[in-house]
Amino acid sequence: MSPSLLELLERLLEGTGSRKAAQKLRRWQHKWQSRNVNQLILNYIEAETKLRFHVQREARLQAEHDALFLNSSSGSIDDKKTAASTVSRMEALQKKLRSLSEDIWHQERTMDMLQARLCALPLRRALVSCRKDQDWYLSEWMRTECARRRGCCARACGCCRRPRSERRPQHRGHCTAACACCEQSRGFAVTGKDAWEPTQMALTSNPKTLNLYATRLRDAYFFGL
């Protein structure tokens, strides 16, 4: 069957409510149509992971800044040294928040660019279809994976199901090392080299042949399967 007829079949399947079947058809086509795109797949997953990390770190730092602001505005700080320290910390947080806002903007642009580079491939159609469902990331495998890493899917807080901050309502997703709820649960912050993400296992994959974990992430991120 020609690629144009296969694409027509995809649309017919989606039009009749069989999106999962359409995605499986795209995955089947991907195996023989979408060659030399594994590096783009890995780059996209890396960019999305970094975006979630930045958004969650921004939310945590914003919460700290707001708490300090409320405390200082309440007049409960009488000691001048403590007040000066609070102001200094707030200024440092504001600087970090501005930097994170820029990082988030760049990661969003990176993801847009990577998606555009997929052109008219079945993989791009799969990605576009997948993102039409705002709950795409709540597949059973991705929730299980988050819970396995002791993320919020392992608890009843529901953080993964809602935006991490009012400032970015469009950003929802599973936990990274920057998740404030996870930090509270484990009792300490993860910084530096310890802020390693399990997704890195996929990024070590050979672009010619994705490893098992990278393949599973590809199916979740691009096909919603």
Image (tube, grey):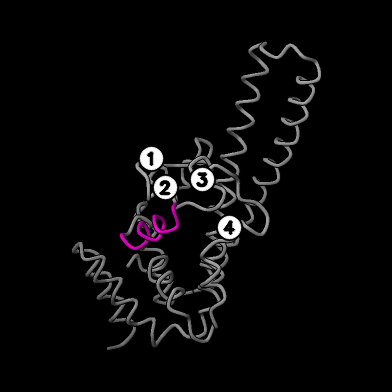
Residue 62 placement (x, y as % from top left): 60, 35
- How dense is the environment of label 4, judged by Cα within 10 Å: few (below 14), some, or many (20 and up)? some
Residue 77 placement (x, y as % from top left): 70, 14
Identify the residue under disc 4: 50
Residue at the spot 77% in from the left edge and 26% down from the top edge = 85
Q: CA distance from mark 1 to mark 2?
A: 7 Å
Identify the residue under disc 3: 186
Q: CA distance from mark 3 to mark 4?
A: 21 Å
Looking at the rendered structure, the secondary structure element under dot 1 is loop
Q: Is residue 66 magenta?
A: no
Mark earlier in primary sequence (1, 2)? 2
Going by the numbered disc 1, the residue's amino acid type is Cys
Residue at the spot 35% in from the left edge and 59% down from the top edge = 144
Mark earlier in primary sequence (1, 4)? 4
Identify the residue under disc 1: 157
Q: Is residue 141 magenta?
A: yes
Q: Which mark is residue 224?
A: none
Q: CA distance from mark 1 to mark 4?
A: 23 Å
Looking at the rendered structure, the secondary structure element under dot 3 is helix
Mark earlier in primary sequence (3, 1)? 1
Q: CA distance from mark 2 to mark 3?
A: 11 Å
Looking at the rendered structure, the secondary structure element under dot 2 is helix
Identify the residue under disc 2: 152
Going by the numbered disc 2, the residue's amino acid type is Cys
Q: CA distance from mark 4 to mark 2?
A: 18 Å
Looking at the rendered structure, the secondary structure element under dot 4 is helix
Please state if 64 lies on the left or on the right of 169 as rendered. right
The magenta stretch is 140-150
